[in-house]
Image: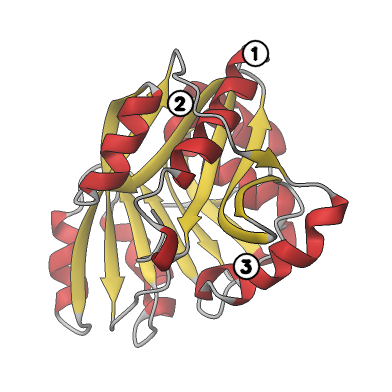
Amino acid sequence: MLEKIKSADIIRTTVRKNPFIHNWLSIDFFSNPQKTEVYGKVEDGILSSYIMIFIGYEQPIVIIYNYSSDMLDYINLVRGKRTVIWVFGEYEELFREMSKTEQVVLRDNVILFARKVNFYPGGKKLMLEDESAFNDFKAKVHWFKNSNFLAFKRYGSFEGEKLVAAALRRGEPNYCNIGGVYTLREYRGKGHAKKVVSLITRECLEMNLVPFLSVHSKNEPAIRAYKAIGFEEFSHFKWIKLNGFTAFDEET
């Protein structure tokens, strides 16, 4: 039986055990506590399995670690919704179950981390004077629109006065999470993502933090760019996309 997790110490200990996988717990549990619920099983002070429900976007998003059938009652809240379930670990049983009532698409994602950096100059840490350019950028990217990113540092790459690529960094003890890497479609293939991500990576390594990120495993141009910067593969996880969900498909 799952229990509702309210202990910040259990969350922190679980994240420290494997931050590349469990960092989403830290981001949402501490940054958006009113919008986040976690249910799971605790063994030796850490979560051996859990389901996290985040209701901060247009539709609830579910993140699962080590799926078990007693999570189904919680998963039912996304039936009929256009959203996504993140699954770390075994996913086949859940995929079959959701296929009974939902339109489902399975997407594989890869987690990468870096121990070194090949730096590509031209990126910039965004400051107050860049707020207008960042807001213009956000307006062009669907999944950026409803997010405030208060817990993240912002970085970007410009062409003239126009912000054409952006990424976000959140730092925790021993690691930093790079997310939201996005280049406007008409500016892709010009190295903007390399500039932004290599800047963040260099900053993280200078602070003795291990940078990591995740990306669609079929996004070969992005993976090549990240590996050119110095990233290497760590592991994979799945998205079960429900009922035509596409909100993060443009993230690169």
Which label's residue is closer to the chain start, 1 or 2?
2
Labels 1, 3: front one: 3
Please name the amino acid that badge 3 sits on.
Phe
Give the numbered dot on residue 137.
3
Q: Which mark is residue 85?
A: none
User: Where on the picture, by quarter, is residue 84?
Assistant: bottom left
Of discs 1 and 2, which sits in the foreground?
1
Q: Which mark is residue 18?
A: 2
- Please give the residue where the numbered disc 1 appears in the rendered image: 206
Looking at the rendered structure, the secondary structure element under dot 2 is loop
Is residue 122 shown above or below 206? below
Tag 3 and tag 2, C-beta contact below 8 Å: no
Q: Which of marks 2 and 3 precedes in the sequence?
A: 2
Who's the residue at 56% across and 30% down the image?
A: 121
Residue 216 position, x and y percent, is: 28, 51
Q: Is residue 49 visible?
A: yes
Q: Indicate the amino acid at tag 1.
A: Glu
